[in-house]
Amino acid sequence: MHSDAFDVIPFEDIKGDWKKLGSGSFGNVYKANYLGIDVAVKEVLPSNDYDVAKYFEREWRLMKEARHPNVVLYLGLSRAPDGRIFIISEFIENGNLRMYIHDKTKPFPWRLRMSFATDITRALAYLHARKCIHRDLKGE
């Protein structure tokens, strides 16, 4: 069922040291903890640009409705006391794909490469079937 209501997560319920993981299209991404589970916290940089606001709204709707084993699970939105907005989603362990590919201390056999490629393809096929073009696919 489709709902326009935001899934609000109280900011004070997001715990941890907020370790910075990287930067995304909208701002920094952090690792934190919510209800005892590790989560990714994506900062939404403020913008008065109408196109940016529409892009954010579109991303929020897609994340909210996406349910696929190869697509990150959206948990909700949170607003800090200073007004900043954050998207809260599941945290995926073991770093990003780019780090994994370039880590020369670990083997990267062809079977695993094919498994990664298949999982990514399944996720993109799912999104494309929902009339979504990702536009921000990257290895980090």
Image (spheres, rainbow, N blue to C red):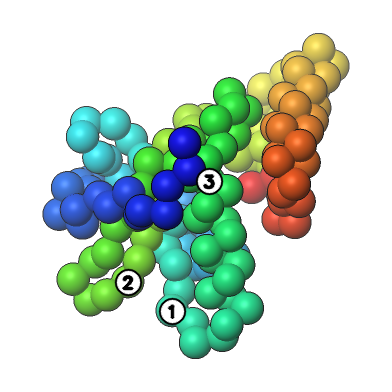
In-front residue for pair 42/9: 9
Quadrant of residue 135 within the rendered picture:
bottom right
- Check whether the beta carbons of the residues at disc 2 and disc 1 lie within 8 A of each other: yes
Q: Which x, y percent locates residue 16? A: 22, 46
Can residue 118 be spotted in the picture?
Answer: yes
Q: How many marks?
A: 3
Q: Pointer 1 and pointer 3: residues touching (CB < 8 Å)?
A: no
Name the quadrant containing residue 118. top right
Residue 46 disc label? 1
Q: CA distance from mark 1 to mark 3?
A: 19 Å
| Residue 136 vertical position relative to residue 44 in the rendered view, above or below | above
Q: Residue furthest bottom?
A: 48
- As drawn, the residue found furthest toward the top would be 111
Q: Mark 3 falls on what kind of element?
A: helix
User: Which comes sooner in the sequence, label 2 or label 1?
Assistant: 1
**Is 30 displayed left or right of 67 in the figure?**
left
- Label 2 neighbour load within 10 Å: few <14, some 14-19, many 20+: few
Residue positioned 67% across, 22% down in the render: 106
